[in-house]
Amino acid sequence: MKIGVFDSGVGGFTVVRELLRLIPQVPIVYFGDTARAPYGTKSRRTLVEFAMEDARFLMEHGAGMIVIACHSAASTATDELKRCLDIPIFDVVSPSIEQACNLTKNKRIGLMGTRATVSSGIYAEKIPKKLPGARLFQQPCPLLVPLVEEGWLKGRETRMIVKKYLRPLKNQQIDTLILGCTHYPLLKDVIREKAGKRIKIVDPSLEVARQVAEEINRKKALQGSDQLVQEIPHRFFVSDLTPHTEDIVASFLGMRVRLERI
Ligand code: DGL
């Protein structure tokens, strides 16, 4: 069983990093749509179309389950993928909502994300269903993806921008904050510092990886064998490749990997 992971580009490597930590023995096939990124600025219709193509590409390369690592794609296209594809689909949105609802005490939850994720309305729809009375406060943060891709993870400018994005959420007295974009886990230290100790942070890359690991371990237990453990190397595909892409991936993963251009 291969795990297929897709994202608009390199951000999904935050999910790959967690999967490698939790279930290093399970082969991953990754697709980063670097030629068509960013997804965070695209319309719902385009995102559904791209997500379907990305998932089908992974299935053609042997994926037996799909992880939608891209929040912009997950918040707009998960239902469509689940309806059309005949394999298990995991996404970064559902486990984050679950965790945020478990953590919040005052039922005031904040979300940082791309414009596509925020305007999808999925969190605002699902959170009160999961936790009656809970309220969601959202903040689009379009400047954060380029900052992360430039490696500006801790500088003065980044801290100022994070502080500015967080202010409206803090004014709403949120006690839980969802990092609703693949890139934000790399800013976790700055976000934690600017959010303050009172606010609990939900990292979706961790949550979805935990969910996938549980499913894999459950399957292994059912099959009673190591059928899922194979000697197949991971494969990492991208639709455009530059030396900078390789550098960003290395910073996301903490190691260099071979990227294949499709
Ligand atoms: N991967 C995207 C997301 O999580 C961020 C980058 C982009 O906009 O493509 O929404």
Image (cartoon, helix red, strand yellow):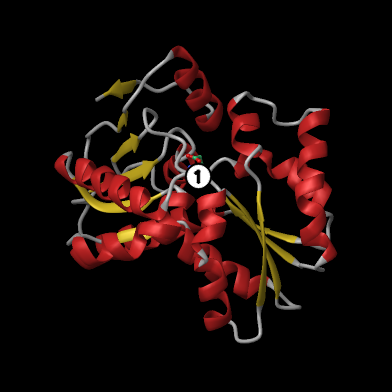
Ligand 1 contact, mark 1 (Cβ < 8 Å) = yes
The residue carrying mark 1 is: 40
| x, y percent for residue 66 | 29, 52
| x, y percent for residue 48 | 32, 53
Say what secondary structure mark 1 lies in. loop
Mark 1 neighbour class, 10 Å CA radius: few under 14, some 14 to 19, many 20 or more: many
| x, y percent for residue 245 | 46, 21
Q: Residue at x 74, y 77 (%)?
A: 105
Between residue 133 and residue 221, name the one nearer to us.
133
Q: Residue at x 26, y 50 (%)?
A: 52
Going by the numbered disc 1, the residue's amino acid type is: Gly
Looking at the image, residue 204 sits to the left or right of residue 27; the answer is right
Answer whether residue 201 is visible to the viewer in this image. yes
| x, y percent for residue 222 | 23, 67
In the rendered image, the residue lying farthest to the bottom is 132
Between residue 64 and residue 22, name the one nearer to us.
64
Looking at the image, residue 118 sits to the left or right of residue 245; the answer is right
Looking at the image, residue 249 sits to the left or right of residue 48; the answer is right
As drawn, 192 above or below 258: below
Between residue 86 and residue 215, name the one nearer to us.
86
Quarter where residue 103 is shown:
bottom right
As drawn, 89 above or below 248: below
Instruction: State which quarter of the image contains the C terminus.
Output: top left
In the rendered image, the residue lying farthest to the top is 243
Q: Residue at x 32, y 37 (%)?
A: 30
Query: How many discs appear?
Result: 1
